[in-house]
């Protein structure tokens, strides 16, 4: 399964990074404290999350070895170098039955390992850390990739809920690896019951 899914993860990761790179937002919204962030709620996606401004969303259908998958992306982006992060992004997709599921711990270990490897490879980065975690008793993974020869940093929190894969990410620059906005964004992700 590793080799079948790796091209999909590379494509999806690169697609989301490339897509959001051209969308800037109003600076006035960016300077608001976390207590004034906007909440995005998706009943279809079954989640809620906070971000510095209004998140845009897009859905794309991608052909994969597992068939066509609909990849949903919510993002907030800025080019303002004074901000802690350039990109705040949440993406999710539903995998076909019997491929990926939160109940299959052995399969998920392999799934997360392949996902992290593909993410590192897709940006020619270096994995700085990776740790297991959970969200509402669902298996999750938290990792950080340094890329662009250490000038860029991508933090990711990923979780599998039944057959749905969520990835919550921030992208920032060197020297801002630890920042309140990144932690607040990743921690604000909640599943709707």
Image: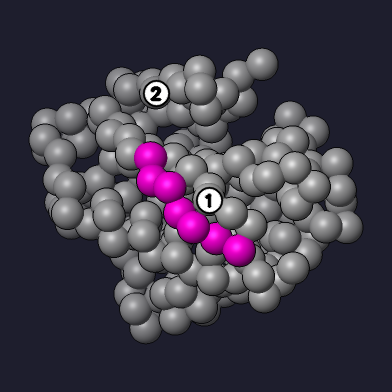
- The x and y percentages for residue 186 are 51, 41
State whether the magenta stretch is mostly helix, strand or loop: strand
Q: Residue at x 78, y 55 (%)?
A: 108
**To which quarter of the image does residue 118 belong?**
bottom right
Q: Which percent across, then down, holds residue 120?
A: 52, 73
Residue where numbered disc 2 is placed: 40
Q: Is residue 173 above or below residue 190?
A: below
Range of magenta residues: 59-65
Decide which of tag 1 and tag 2 comes sooner along the chain. 2
Asked if residue 125 is among those painted magenta in the image, a careful observer would answer no
Between residues 38 and 4, which one lies in front from this camera angle? 4
180 w.r.t. 44: above or below: below
Q: Residue furthest front?
A: 67
Give residue 186's mark.
Answer: none
Q: Dividing the picture into quarters, in which one does residue 21 lie?
A: bottom left
Q: Compute the Cα span from label 1 to label 2.
A: 26 Å
Label 2, secondary structure: give it: strand
Question: As rendered, which of 24 and 180 lies closer to the eye?
Answer: 24
Circle 1 packing at 10 Å, graded few (<14), some (14-19), many (20+), is: few
Position of residue 100 in the picture relative to residue 78 (left or right):
right
Front tag of 1 and 2:
1
Q: Is residue 25 left or right of residue 104?
A: left
Q: Is residue 93 above or below residue 143?
A: above
Residue 46 placement (x, y as % from top left): 56, 23
Residue 64 in magenta?
yes
Q: Which mark is residue 68?
A: 1
> In the rendered view, does 179 fall on the left or right side of 28?
right
Quarter that holds the C terminus: top right
Residue 92: percent from left, percent from top: 52, 42
Q: Is residue 145 at least partly visible in the picture?
A: no
Residue 38 seen in the figure: yes
């Amino acid at each position: 399964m590793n080799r079948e899914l790796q091209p999909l993860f590379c494509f999806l990761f690169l697609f989301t990074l490339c897509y959001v790179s051209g969308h800037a937002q109003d600076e006035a919204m960016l300077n608001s404290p976390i207590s004034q962030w906007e909440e995005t709620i998706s009943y279809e996606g079954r989640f809620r999350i906070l971000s510095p401004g209004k998140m845009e969303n897009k859905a794309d259908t991608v052909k994969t070895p597992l068939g066509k998958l609909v990849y949903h992306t919510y993002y907030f982006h800025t080019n303002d170098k004074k901000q802690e992060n350039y990109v705040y992004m949440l993406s999710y997709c539903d995998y076909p039955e019997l491929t990926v599921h939160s109940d299959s711990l052995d399969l998920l270990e392999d799934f997360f390992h392949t996902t992290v490897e593909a993410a590192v490879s897709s940006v020619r980065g270096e994995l700085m850390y990776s740790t297991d975690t959970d969200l509402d008793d669902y298996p999750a993974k938290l990792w950080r990739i340094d890329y662009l020869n250490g000038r860029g940093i991508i933090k990711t929190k990923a979780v599998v809920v039944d057959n749905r894969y969520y990835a919550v990410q921030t992208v920032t620059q060197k020297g801002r690896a630890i920042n309140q906005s990144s932690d607040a964004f990743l921690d604000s992700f909640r599943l709707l019951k």
